[in-house]
Image (cartoon, helix red, strand yellow):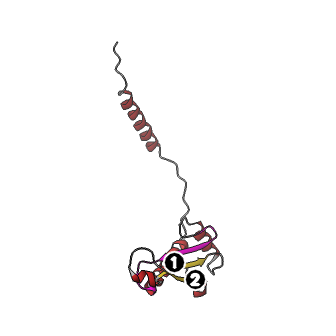
Amino acid sequence: MTNFHISPEEVELTAIRSQGPGGQNVNKVASAIQLRFDIHASSLPIDVKERLLSLRDHRITQSGWVVIKSQEHRSQDMNRMAALLRLHDLLALATVVQKKRKATRPTRSSQLKRVESKVKRGQTKALRGKAQWD
């Protein structure tokens, strides 16, 4: 994992109202946080940007923005910390380089076992047919 630093100017934090039940507090206080992070304009290394954009994550838009909404806490500060932690986890996921898969061939015994199991299954199914009265 490569160490890199994201400046606070690269992250947009907006306070919004939380959804769901909650009485007067939820109607008056904007305690939820929406975090927006532009991948293309960030100071991340190019390879990390590419891996981040190739992730299949619903929080990454087609235009290259990471949008994270945090509303599980009652306080705005706790939601801000939760959103930043989620961004950190997403970036940590993008820094991991996947090992290249080595193509291998199936062994002769595994091929034989596969064919034998198919033959056995076919014989079982053939026995389920109508009875032959000769």
Residue 12's spot in the image, x, y percent? 58, 82
Q: Is residue 74 magenta?
A: yes
Q: Amino acid at mark 1?
A: Leu
- Dots 1, 2 in contact, CB < 8 A: yes
Residue 44's spot in the image, x, y percent? 61, 79
Q: CA distance from mark 1 to mark 2?
A: 10 Å
Q: Amino acid at mark 2?
A: Val
Residue 122's spot in the image, x, y percent? 41, 32
Q: Is residue 131 magenta?
A: no
Residue under label 2, please give it.
11
Residue 94's spot in the image, x, y percent? 55, 72
Q: Which of the two discs, 1 and 2, sits closer to the camera?
A: 2
Label 1 or label 2, whichever comes before in sequence order: 2
Magenta segment, which residues?
A: 61-76
Q: Secondary structure at mark 1?
A: helix
Q: Secondary structure at mark 2?
A: strand
Q: Name the image quarter holding residue 112.
A: top left
Mark sitting on residue 87: 1
